[in-house]
Amino acid sequence: MQTRAVYAKGKMDFDFRDEQVGPPGNQDVIIKVHACGICGTDINFARDWPDDYMPLGHEIAAEVVELGPDVSALKAGDKVIVEDCTMCGVCGNCKRGHVEFCRNMYNLNDKPGMAEYMCVRQNSCVPFDGLDYKSASLTEPLAVSLTAVLNAEIPLGGSVVVLGPGPLGLMAAKVAKLRGAGFVALTGLNRSTPREKARLDLAAHYGADMVIEAESQSVEDLIKSKFPNGVDRVIVTSPPRSMYDALKIIRFGGIITFLGLHFGGQDAIELSINDLIFNKITLRPTFAEPAINFPLSNQLLRDGLVDPRKLITHTPSLDQLKGTIGSIISGDKPIVKAVCLPNG
């Protein structure tokens, strides 16, 4: 079976390849990719990655079309979300009940989700129903936001600031409210571009009680005017330099969870270890691999507790993918979340 697949590296250098898929191995299935979300990691690869081409796409909603000889958990026609990293189940960490520390994970074998077809292991597939493919593709990014919120250990009625108004930030704000936060603020740059305006305008719908435009407003002043001692928790979904704002607004004994990446040389910041120690501040990185929160994430979408409809604003084809990623980077279109439809 032939498939068209997309790779990219820095300076918007895209490589569209025709590749062979299958036949499936004993434990593999061939899937038809109906929807694949464009992630911040994909954008980082296309804008900043200096080395060889990277596969694009890991937020995959698909249909099973062919089974390997030993596949028993799935059948042709099943609708599935594909985990980008799946626990092995047999290593020491998995056996001890700490699957989050598995280092022998199954992955996508350097193949892009932005392709018409893929071959994946059956145990990386999570069956779903009650959602269309586009909405179901939000399962992976919502699981990332969910993991960050769970890592934050938000106290009941607590105060939370989410830095970054992208899809991960918007969903983190909503899940923080579901988790029991009494106050949630969301920060972004400002409404000067169609992209930022579209995202900040959605903040209230996704649970934000306050919206801060950080290019024209002081995050510290606005938060400290309401919480003089700082907030209980900060969730950082924006690039690493946003940690400076997080450290200014966290209270004594607070927790900062962070997941924002940068591949263009801006991944390092300076901080005072003394301040962290004396103020008993916990920095807790969030890396949602292996993908242990897919079932709960999918349930939140299916039950309407996190609304997928307003997030997905653009659905490019493979041919439109480069232009869409360019617009996400420039901000010239009101893109909140773009989901690629590889098969139209």
Image: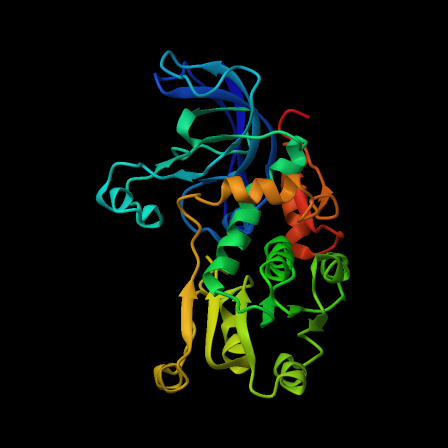
> As rendered, which of 11 and 69 lies closer to the eye?
69
Query: Which quadrant would residue 110 be assigned to in this image?
Result: top left
Q: At 76% from the left edge and 52% from the top edge, which residue is drawn?
A: 334
- Residue 163 drawn at (x, y percent): 59, 67
Figure check: 100 above or below 205: above
- Residue 56 drawn at (x, y percent): 51, 39
Residue 336 visible here: yes
Residue farthest along the top direction in this orientation: 69
Q: At 33% from the left edge and 39% from the top edge, which residue is drawn?
A: 105
> As rendered, which of 306 and 20 lies closer to the eye?
306
> As rendered, which of 45 and 21 lies closer to the eye?
21
Residue 8 visible here: no
Figure check: 149 above or below 216: above
Figure check: 88 above or below 257: above
Residue farthest along the front direction in this orientation: 156
Quadrant where the image shows the C terminus: top right
Q: Is residue 324 left or right of residue 126?
A: right
Query: Which quadrant would residue 207 be assigned to in this image?
Result: bottom right
Query: Which quadrant would residue 319 be assigned to in this image?
Result: top right
